[in-house]
Amino acid sequence: MHISTKTALEKLEESKHLFFELFHHGTLNVEIYKPDEIDLQMPHERDEIYVIVSGTGKFINGDRTISFQPGDFLFVPAGMEHRFLNFTKDFSTWVFLYGQKGGEK
């Protein structure tokens, strides 16, 4: 399986949504996500990984706020409050959701 970032972003744009699922295998879901000015995410039932494609900004993960840039890896355990803030217009990220509801221990 191969999905280029270019192809992922083209499919996202065609979908007219903020995120688009590109791959599913077992408990793994792979998406591309590009919020429009405000990230309105709610906590997820499963563990989640972000790998930043482009853009910079801040990321709230529970009680921590960090800066992010392209190539960064961010982990969010299931149920954790999180969101992207003050991100540039070119911001996009790969999203990997996996495991059981409630997260892995």
Image: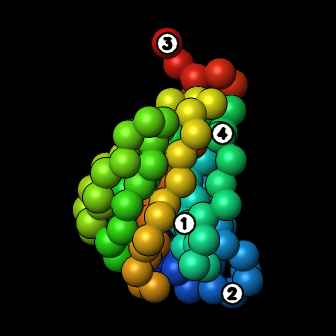
Q: Say what secondary structure mark 4 lies in.
A: loop
User: How dense is the environment of label 4, judged by Cα within 10 Å: few (below 14), some, or many (20 and up)?
Assistant: some
Q: Is residue 38 left or right of residue 77?
A: right
Q: Say what secondary structure mark 2 lies in.
A: helix
Residue, x 49% and y 12% (percent of image)? 105
**For residue 32, which numbered disc appears in the image?**
1
Residue, x 32% and y 72% (percent of image)? 56
Q: Say what secondary structure mark 1 lies in.
A: strand
Position of residue 49 measured from the top left corner of the image (x, y, whole percent): 45, 44
Position of residue 23 measured from the top left corner of the image (x, y, whole percent): 59, 56
Q: Are marks 1 and 3 in contact (CB under 8 Å)?
A: no
Circle 4: residue type: His
Query: How far apart are the two marked residues, 3 and 2, measured between alpha carbons?
Result: 37 Å
User: How dense is the environment of label 2, judged by Cα within 10 Å: few (below 14), some, or many (20 and up)?
Assistant: few
Q: Are marks 4 and 1 in contact (CB under 8 Å)?
A: no
Q: Which numbered disc flags the more N-terminal residue, 1 or 3?
A: 1
Q: Outermost residue, right direction?
A: 16
Q: Which numbered disc flags the more N-terminal residue, 2 or 4?
A: 2
Residue that badge 2 annotates: 14
Q: Which numbered disc flags the more N-terminal residue, 4 or 1?
A: 1
Residue that badge 3 annotates: 105
Residue that badge 4 annotates: 44
Residue, x 46% and y 85% (percent of image)? 89
Query: How far apart are the two marked residues, 1 and 2, measured between alpha carbons?
Result: 12 Å
Residue, x 54% and y 66% (percent of image)? 32
Tell us which disc is closer to us: 2 or 4: 4
Q: Which numbered disc flags the more N-terminal residue, 3 or 2?
A: 2
**Viewer-side residue, 93 vs 64:** 64
Q: Residue 75: which quarter of the image?
A: top left
